[in-house]
Image: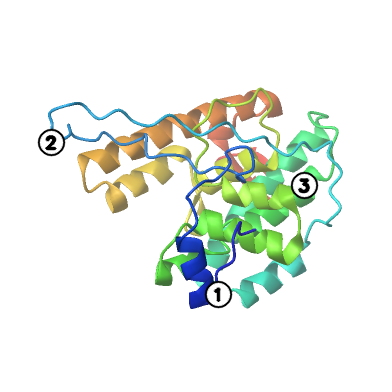
Amino acid sequence: AAITDVDTREAYESLRKRPLHVSARKAPMPQSTDQHFITPPLSSGRHYENPALPPLPQLWSLDHREEAPIPDEAACRALWTRYAMFAHIERHSERVAEVAVALARRAVDIGATRHPELVKLALAAGLLHDIAKSYTVQYGGSHAQIGASWVIDSTGNHKVAQAVYHHVEWPWPLPDDLLHPVFLVIYADKRARHDEIVTLDERYEDLLVRYGKSEQSRIAIQRGWEHSKTIERVLSAQLEFPLHESTVVGGGLVPRA
């Protein structure tokens, strides 16, 4: 999914001399800015203004016919092996897929969606959402961006790739209908603490302990918690089930004990 492929010194030098211009219309799945953070005033004394968010990406409609098949569980696990995923990330991905599939099944069972393939999309996107995490832990980079490009290269399925790309956050206004692989995986990922299904509060308390080392990081974590709670409320209404009181047993949503 790379816009430009650079494999040699000659290709790099050629690219370096070209004018820097990327058409916003053609840019695939734009990445969010760091607007979650408060930047101190500039050295001039002028207050820093966060750049505007890039244009809202167009979600792949479930009505759109996808030529590439949805990878099944065996195909996803084969990609885990190809991209050398760490065992603990595999276990986390299993929990995320478990939650995402339970949400999708609930949507199908109550007639909230007319797309039964949502279950297969949720499974594939959940299993592959962290496909590049092991790589970026070792070498750096955005695991969401790299992972999405790997999914496109390996499966050709744009709906699954888009869910992988956006699973970390969705900083734009929420659409009316969240019964889409992107939002099922965003929410499922926030309900999985390592390889355990927990509440959003438990998940974000853990994030505060592990990553809330500065005021800026704590503000970002708090904002993420509030956004995830909004997604939870909307999904609860659309699925007619109190997700904050739920867990997954036998592949379906059940009340927490």
Instruction: Say which residue appears at 28% left-offset and 43% top-offset.
Output: 217
Question: Residue 4 sits in which quadrant?
Answer: bottom right
Name the residue carrying label 3: 119
| Residue at mark 1 to residue at mark 2: CA–CA distance | 39 Å
Instruction: Say which residue appears at 83% left-offset and 56% top-offset.
Output: 68
| Count of numbered badges drawn on the protein | 3
Say whether disc 1 or disc 2 marks the residue closer to the N-terminus: 1
The answer to which of 243 and 121 lies nearer the viewer is 121
As displayed, is residue 223 above or below residue 145?
A: above
Say whether disc 2 or disc 3 marks the residue closer to the N-terminus: 2
Quadrant including the N terminus: bottom right
Q: Is residue 244 left or right of residue 201?
A: right
As displayed, is residue 235 above or below residue 214?
A: above
| Residue at mark 3 to residue at mark 1: CA–CA distance | 38 Å
Q: Amino acid at mark 2?
A: Ser
| Residue at mark 2 to residue at mark 3: CA–CA distance | 52 Å
Residue 65 screen position, x and y as percent:
87, 43
Name the residue carrying label 1: 7
Residue 252 screen position, x and y as percent:
71, 45
Quadrant including the C terminus: top right
Q: Nearer the viewer, mark 3 or mark 1?
A: 1
Q: Is residue 240 left or right of residue 34?
A: right
Name the residue carrying label 2: 43
Instruction: Say which residue appears at 61% left-offset and 52% top-offset.
Output: 164
Q: Nearer the viewer, mark 2 or mark 3?
A: 2
